[in-house]
């Protein structure tokens, strides 16, 4: 019974709309790296016209509450509202947007990406011990990078590389799209290799990566914090 309650609560938390205070005339910015689809009608069953590009802004004309969700997979979705933007012939779904203007840049000089972490504030290194399943202590070096909205921890062990980022001041939608941007790879700027959903437990969602990314963990922590762990092994 306790497990069912936790899963129910997690489902509610995962599906919190990206902003609880959407207002008419507010400006929102596209944070979906594939762009925000414009639908002829406020439903996912409607035909789509074209996309609004990553980083572009809209001005809200009308907000339409809905029970529809943006489905990432069968067991994971993002909740939101339908928005009628001013000057746009159609509707968009709010999970593709943020009130925060993202820093849009080119990753590998060709892949459009976003940065919600902010500019690096400082970097530090320290020696530490990693305890294996056999209770063996291995000396490793941790590298820390601090940002206005995140703390990044990086280390390598047995041919694998681990990047753990703790986010604050961000919503689940913003963290999810940042995670996709960080792990997205492509052979060309118009080809995408995104994460595949694997499973979800009480406070953790697991994804499978491609092209150098093995597994990605999205964890929901206390006090509005989120953690993303990216594992890459050679």
Image: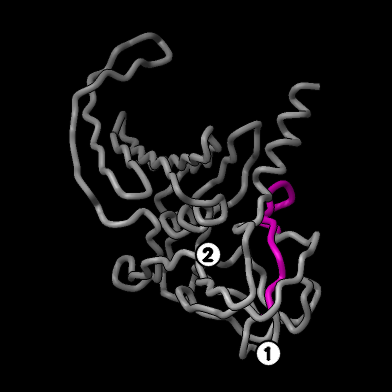
Whether 233 is drawn above or below 184: the answer is above
Circle number at residue 25: none
Q: State the residue in front, 179 or 56.
A: 56
> Residue placed at 31% from the left, 37% from the top?
153
**SS majority, magenta:** strand
The residue to which callout 2 is attached is 98
The N terminus: image quadrant: top right
Check disc 2: other Cα within 10 Å, few if <14, some if 14-19, many if 20+.
Answer: many
**Please, what secondary structure does the residue beneath circle 1 have?**
loop
Q: Is residue 131 visible?
A: yes
Percent x, y of residue 70: 69, 61
Numbered mark located on residue 89 in the image:
1
Relative horizontal placement of residue 19, taking residue 228 as reference (left or right): right
Magenta region includes residue 78: yes
Rendered image quadrant of residue 44: bottom right
Query: What kind of element bears circle 2?
Result: strand
* Magenta segment: 71-84
Q: Depth check: 63 or 82 in front?
A: 63
**Which of the 4 quarters of the picture holds residue 112?**
bottom left
Colour scheme: one colour
Question: How many marks can you see?
Answer: 2
Q: Whole-percent x and y of residue 35?
A: 54, 74
Magenta-span inclusion, residue 121: no
Residue at 67% x, 86% y: name it: 49
Residue 103 lies in quadrant? bottom left
Residue at the spot 65% in from the left edge and 56% down from the top edge: 17
What residue is rendered at 27% in x and 56% in y? 119
- How far is the residue under mark 1 from the one under mark 2? 20 Å
* Residue 233 appears in the rendering: no
């Amino acid at each position: 019974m306790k497990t069912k309650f936790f899963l129910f609560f997690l489902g509610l938390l995962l599906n919190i709309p990206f902003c609880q205070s959407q207002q008419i005339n507010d400006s929102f910015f596209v944070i979906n790296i594939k762009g925000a689809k414009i639908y002829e009608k406020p439903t996912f069953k409607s035909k789509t016209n074209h996309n609004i590009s990553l980083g572009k802004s809209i001005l809200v004309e009308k907000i339409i509450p809905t029970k529809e969700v943006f489905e990432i997979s069968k067991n994971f979705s993002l909740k939101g509202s339908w928005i009628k933007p001013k000057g746009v012939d159609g509707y968009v779904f709010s999970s593709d947007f943020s009130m925060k203007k993202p820093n849009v840049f080119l990753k590998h000089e060709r892949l459009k990406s976003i940065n919600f972490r902010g500019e690096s504030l400082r970097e530090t290194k320290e020696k530490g011990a990693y305890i294996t399943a056999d209770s063996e202590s291995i000396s490793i070096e941790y590298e820390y990078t601090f940002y206005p909205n995140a703390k990044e921890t990086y280390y390598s062990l047995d041919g694998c590389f681990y990047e753990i980022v703790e986010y604050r001041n961000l919503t689940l939608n913003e963290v999810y799209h940042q995670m996709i941007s960080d792990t997205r790879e492509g052979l060309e700027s118009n080809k995408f290799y995104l994460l595949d959903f694997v499973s979800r437990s009480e406070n953790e969602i697991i994804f499978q990566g491609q092209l150098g990314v093995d597994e990605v963990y999205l964890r929901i922590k206390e006090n509005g914090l989120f953690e993303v762990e990216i594992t890459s092994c050679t």
